Amino acid sequence: MTERKIKKIVLAYSGGLDTSVMLRWLREEYGCEVVCYCADVGQGEELAGLEEKARATGASKLYVEDLRREFVEEYVWTAVKANAVYEGVYLLGTSLARPVIAKRQIEIARREGADAVAHGATGKGNDQVRFELTYYALEPDIRVVAPWREWEFKGRSDLIAYAREHDIPVTATAEKPYSTDRNLMHVSYEGGILEDPWAEPPADIFQMTSAPESAKAEAEYVTVEFERGIPVGLNGEQLGAVELLEKLNHIGGEHGVGRVDLVENRFVGMKSRGVYETPGVTILQAAHRALESITLDREVLRLRDRLSLKFAESVYYGFWFAPESELMRKIIDETQDAVTGEARVKLYRGNTTVVGRRSPHTLYRERLATFEADTVYNQRDAEGFIKLNALRLRTKAATSD
């Protein structure tokens, strides 16, 4: 059966080398209208002149969508509430951005009456999975075009040659030593000089953080306020989501907080070395965890922690809109009802140390925990508690001779 001809494609477009070439290639290969879409999730790229560039390369129009607030409030804050960490250290900065970008791309495709969407992810990475799982979850019959899985180009030099041949305006002239991805939550670095897992990342690659050894010599204290697990204030000032995260990124960056270097397991099966900077959310994770320690029941906290591992894995793999992820988000929200209060964090040369926590819903009772004399806890009760818990151990020991 012959696949129907595509009439209109919505391309996720940045104006860089890859997507500029893709725009021209899609027009030639599929002979259809191409609408470009650029999502602003805080990557800081210059958007001025992007529409003229897209039109000059063959786009019928360009959408520039400011998704920063939605990204932080709906995705980043959810990960903070979940204490979501992949493989022990990765805070999921890239993984969380993909579903919000892909979701708006599908919305634009519907608005435009497009029958296909396209992205610039390669056939080796996780992003192709994250984009396409979101596409299909929201629009089951959408056609997906992934040029890196189709075209004849083998690498960056081929793209540069094609751009020159077709007078496509790009600034790239040589292979980058590594690839980067930035948003409001983090910066990631992969490939090139980082592909040797023994090699230390060059000092000059980092964009958000100072090196811990050359960071501020004086420690700084920050107090984060939460309402039902959501960050709402910093140092006594109520702030919107975007501003709060931007400020924490700046403060944490000055103290060298949030650098991570790991070899992670990609969903497609290979191992990959990634270097990340996530200063603000590193602070938020520590503060949130501290507040939970006094507001959540022990068994609720442990149950949520087991869920956190699964949730982080689902986000990393691209299943944000899967039924199990929606259920996990509801459960996680239920655990956050009492997580209201403040946590105080000390920042010093790469270290994030919790030094205080308080909440109107605290379960901590000093009169129970004190080592001083008290009248609310009978220490003799512990004897029976211990003997009951030791019963199976004593039984085993008695039968092992």
Image (tube, grey):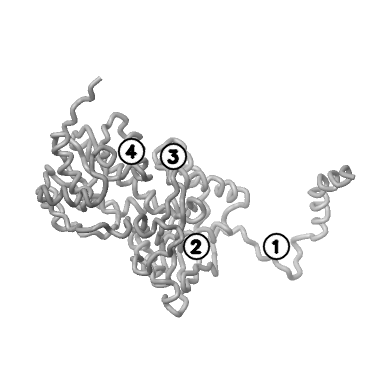
Give the CA distance from mark 4 to mark 3. 18 Å
Mark 2: few/some/many CA within 10 Å (<14, 14-19, 20+): many
Please rate how many residues cluster around mark 3, counting C-alpha atoms within 10 Å: few if below 14, some from 14 to 19, many from 20.
Answer: some
Where disc 3 sits, the SS reads helix
Kind of residue indicated by mark 1: Leu
State whether residue 379 appears in this view: yes
- Residue found at x 27% / y 35%: 144
Indicate whether 30 appears above or below 186.
above
Q: Position of residue 71 (x, y in %)?
A: 34, 51
Q: Which mark is residue 132?
A: 4
Gap in angstroms between the C-alphas marked 3 and 2? 25 Å
Q: Select label 4 or label 2 by which is in front.
A: 4
Mark 2: which secondary structure?
Answer: helix
Q: Is residue 114 above or below residue 222?
A: above
Going 36% across and 66% down the picture, which residue do you hit? Answer: 206
Q: Three-letter amino acid code at disc 3?
A: Glu
| Residue at image location 46% in from the left, 79% down from the top | 218
Which residue position is annotated with label 2? Answer: 287
Disc 1 designates what residue? 368
Spatial distance from mark 3 to mark 1, Cα to Cα?
A: 39 Å
- The residue lying toward the viewer, choosing from 250 and 397, is 397
Q: Give the mark, 1 or 2, whose residue is nearer the N terminus.
A: 2
**Element type at marker 4?**
helix
Q: Can you tell which of label 3 and label 1 is closer to the viewer?
A: 3
Residue corresponding to mark 3: 326
